[in-house]
Image: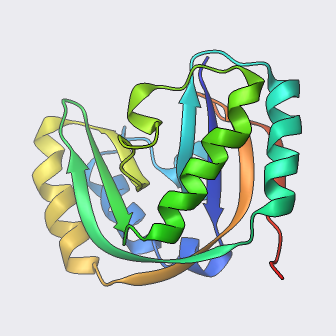
């Protein structure tokens, strides 16, 4: 089973995405959503086929102690086309967000994991997955319903987690530093 390192959205930011997640669940009863996976909406910093969870947890502990929570603005919707497809909310890509991602990879490199290529710096597309595994016939309905419910949303990336998936199993989690 693969592993992911995620930055969870704060409860207010995550809750504001409920109408979009509802749209996915109505249109495709088999699509995986954060609610169905029982995880908080999040940005994935890295995904791995294999890793040493103990070593990664130690790296994440150091990273979390030095990393302040950061505010993001979710300003757009997107689709990674399939089949099956993925609907996501995308944040404004700021220098701060890219620096956080780069710092994470520098901190975790010593743990030795080999990250999936599209999560590496210079290839990463930051996104909050709202639904994955969406069947081709449901994509249009999902998009129309999501667009109708869309508005930009603020959120705070406040917690870092290490999970194994599917099904999702939380292996380690901690709030990031509150900052100076």
**Residue 99 visible in the current orientation:** yes
- Quarter of the image that includes the C terminus: bottom right
The percent position of residue 71, horizontal first and vertical second, equals: 57, 79
- For image coordinates 56% across by 71% down, the residue present is 14
Report whether 38 appears left or right of 126: right
Q: How is the image coloured?
A: rainbow
Q: Above or below — where is 76 with respect to 56? A: below
Closer-to-camera residue (43/137) = 43
Number of marks in the rendered image: 0
Q: Above or below — where is 43 with respect to 151? A: above
Closer-to-camera residue (3/142) = 3
- For image coordinates 63% across by 74% down, the residue present is 70
- Quarter of the image that includes the N terminus: top right
Q: Above or below — where is 23 with respect to 105? A: below
Please identify the quarter of the rendering in which residue 17 is found: bottom left
Please identify the quarter of the rendering in which residue 151 is found: bottom left
The percent position of residue 104, horizontal first and vertical second, equals: 65, 47
- For image coordinates 36% across by 72% down, the residue present is 92
Please identify the quarter of the rendering in which residue 163 is found: top right
The percent position of residue 42, horizontal first and vertical second, equals: 56, 57
The percent position of residue 49, horizontal first and vertical second, equals: 57, 17
- For image coordinates 79% across by 31% down, the residue present is 56
**Residue 41 visible in the current orientation:** no
């Amino acid at each position: 089973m693969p592993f992911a390192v995620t930055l969870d959205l704060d409860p207010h930011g995550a809750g504001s995405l409920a109408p979009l997640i509802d749209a996915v669940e109505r249109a495709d009863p088999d699509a995986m959503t954060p609610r169905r996976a029982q995880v908080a909406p999040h940005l994935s910093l890295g995904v791995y086929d294999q890793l040493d969870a103990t070593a990664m947890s130690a790296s994440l502990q150091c990273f979390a102690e030095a990393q302040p929570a950061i505010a993001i603005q979710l300003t757009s919707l997107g689709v990674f086309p399939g089949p099956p497809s993925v609907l996501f909310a995308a944040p404004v890509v700021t220098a701060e967000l890219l620096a956080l991602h780069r710092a994470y990879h520098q901190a975790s490199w010593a743990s030795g994991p080999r990250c999936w290529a599209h999560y590496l710096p210079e290839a990463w597309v930051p996104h909050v997955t709202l639904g994955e595994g969406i069947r081709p016939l449901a994509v249009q309905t999902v998009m129309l319903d999501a667009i109708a419910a869309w508005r930009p949303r603020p959120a705070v990336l406040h917690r870092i987690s290490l999970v194994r998936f599917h099904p999702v199993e939380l292996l380690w989690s901690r709030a990031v530093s509150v900052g100076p």
